[in-house]
Amino acid sequence: MPSPGPYIAFAYGYGEGGTRQIAVEVEFAPGYSAITGIKFWPNQETPGFVSRMDPWAIEDVIEFQSTDLPRDLIENGATVTTKAFLKAVQEVLDRVGFVYVPPFAGSGDGDGPLPPSASTPPPAVSTPPTSVSTPPPAVSTPAPPPPARFYAGTHMGVSNNTYSHTQDGKDDGYTEGPIIVEITTTEHEITDMRLVASNDGSDYTGLFFGRQGQSRRDQIMRQGNTNGVEHIADATYSTRAIIEAIGNAIAAARR
């Protein structure tokens, strides 16, 4: 059964001076039977527009299990932002092939299926005893394969912005947007990892995903977790945030 997520997609809303990237994360019930949660990262989106569409848009998508909402998007005062949010959510729904099927709720007045009619069971047929014979020799059974550790596929993880740098060079350990990574897994191992999005400086994130971070990436793929993985001294805050995001992606992939 595929992982319930989370799955992340991007779109562009309105910011001062032009469009700004937003990101949404959508969580599903097992088997993609329902949308259970949505997180919204406005990044550099204009706060006034975000406050007009959040949280009602999130609540409505979860209530109706669809981005086709019975609400006039033009009159809410945040048209571009709202449409960008719904576009990103729909991208996730299309990616996993989500189609909501409401649970059946019969009223008992002929709406539901009729119970099977009662009938008299056929008389039991006696079985003659089988002849006693020597059982065949036992056949050795090969050992079963090891249990699966992960859901096979791609999985995203997000840092909580505790450690990463800002682009303006201030060493305050905080950035406006999340660091988002993606890992690829088989049922038994991690085969790849990459940076998806970040407002962090590329000089810092590039250290982890370049030659200097190769041993750390190999350690994570070998272990199947981030335990004991050290940050890079020249990019302490950034690599701590990346390792945290990878750990969250592994948690999403784990069975």
Image (cartoon, rainbow, N blue to C red):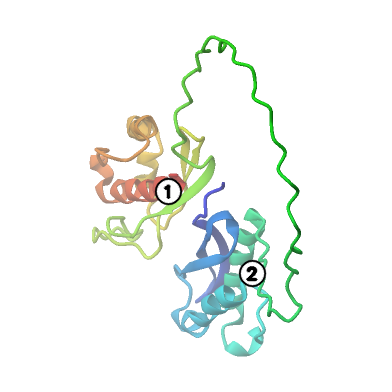
Q: Are marks 1 and 2 in contact (CB under 8 Å)?
A: no
- In the displayed structure, would residue 91 be above or below residue 254? below
Q: Where is residue 189 in the image (x, y as percent from the top left)?
A: 45, 33
Tag 2 residue: 103
The spot of residue 50 in percent (x, y) is 48, 79
On the image, the x and y values in percent for residue 227 come to 27, 39
Q: In this view, does 221 lie to the left or right of 119?
A: left
How many residues crowd mark 2 within 10 Å: few (<14), some (14–19), many (20+)?
few
- Amino acid on which the number 2 mark rests in the picture: Pro
Alpha-carbon span between mark 1 and mark 2:
31 Å
Q: In this view, does 225 lie to the left or right of 147?
A: left
* Label 2: element kind: loop
State the residue at coordinates (50%, 55%).
5
Secondary structure of residue under mark 1: helix
Which quarter of the figure is the C terminus placed in?
Answer: top left
Residue 75: image tag: none
Residue pictured at 49% horizontal, 67% vertical: 37
- Which residue occupies 50% across, 39% down? 184
Q: Which residue does the numbered mark 1 point to in the structure image?
A: 249
Q: What residue type is labelled 1?
A: Ala
